[in-house]
Image (tube, helix red, strand yellow):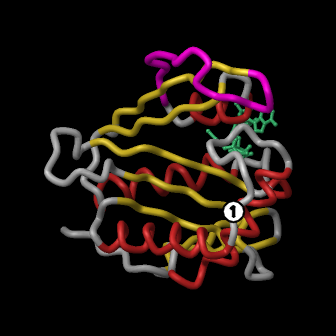
Amino acid sequence: MQLNISPGKKIGEVAFGKEKLILRAIKLKDAEGCIKFFNKIIKEGARVLLAERVDLEAEKRWVKSKVEALKRKRALTLVLENSNGEICGIFELRKRTMLKSKVDHVAEFAVSVDAKYRGKGLATKVAKILFKLGKKFLKLKLIRSSYAERNIASAKLHKKLGFKITGRIPKGFKIGRKYEDEVLVVKELE
Ligand SMILES: CC(C)(COP(=O)(O)OP(=O)(O)OC[C@H]1O[C@@H](n2cnc3c(N)ncnc32)[C@H](O)[C@@H]1OP(=O)(O)O)[C@@H](O)C(=O)NCCC(=O)NCCS
């Protein structure tokens, strides 16, 4: 059966201690929530792809591209919203932009969780939900991802989710003034 996920669609609730977080698809109105979330992650110096704070116009364009990709079943971007209505996690699977390619069974995984919500199994729990949905919604067989070598939390998360290391790109990340290898990982979906 076909799975349909429209922008803003609620996927479910995820318990975090006593708090109930809402897991839902991204929607156009998320630009302000996303910019707040990403700028916090950048400020803490996390080993993520994004290097600089972004402005609202750029964030609106980013959110719009994600909403359009969701509608075209090229990507699945889910946000976690806390009880104050703030975004506290973003989870994504995205295919390459090329249509009808020979890599259409593959998507890239991206994940970030607000510092307040880390270390309690949240990313593991939500990523598993995302992968199940991604398999059906995007018709995936393979998920690829990567992380900076010294991003211990990300390395552990990927291992726990069943990713296997397939290679590395020497100096693939520039963190501050130093370079770090990018570790490439892949997970086959059952
Ligand atoms: C990576 C990240 C998403 C993990 O989120 P999380 O909700 O804390 O992850 P989980 O609680 O599900 O933990 C997954 C594993 O990582 C471990 N872990 C989490 N944070 C850790 C830390 N700071 N140091 C060491 N291990 C850590 C957990 O113990 C767990 O492994 P274990 O069960 O074998 O012990 C989160 O740290 C984050 O958003 N970091 C900043 C952005 C980022 O680096 N994103 C990934 C880019 S590739």
In the rendered image of this protein, does residue 54 appear above or below residue 29?
A: above
Find disc 1 in the rendering and name its residue: 54
The residue depicted at 72 percent of the width and 51 percent of the height is 52
Q: Secondary structure at mark 1?
A: loop
Quadrant in the picture for the N terminus: bottom left
Q: Dot 1, crowdedness within 10 Å: few (<14), some or many (≥20)?
A: some
Asked if the stretch drawn in magenta spans residue 38, the answer is no
Residues 147 and 117: in front is 147
Camera-nearest residue between 52 and 44: 52
- Residue 32 vs residue 7: left or right? right
Residue 37 lies, in percent from the top left, at 74, 64
Q: Is residue 26 above or below residue 145?
A: below
Q: Residue at image x 60%, y 52%?
A: 125
Task: Give the amino acid at mark 1.
Answer: Val
| Magenta segment, prevailing SS (helix, strand or loop) | strand
Percent x, y of residue 30: 60, 78
**Is the shortest distance between ligand 1 and the CB of mark 1 under 8 Å?**
no
Residue 104 place in picture, x, y as percent = 22, 46
**Residue shown at 53% from the left, 32% from the top:** 146
Q: Quadrant of residue 152?
A: top right
Which residue is outermost to the bottom?
Answer: 29
Q: Where does the C terminus fall, quadrant-wise?
A: top left
Residue stretch rendered in magenta on the structure: 163-178
- The answer to which of 55 and 63 lies nearer the viewer is 55
Query: Would you say 49 lies left or right of 19 here?
Result: left
Please state the horizontal and vertical placement of residue 89, each as a whole percent of the image: 67, 61
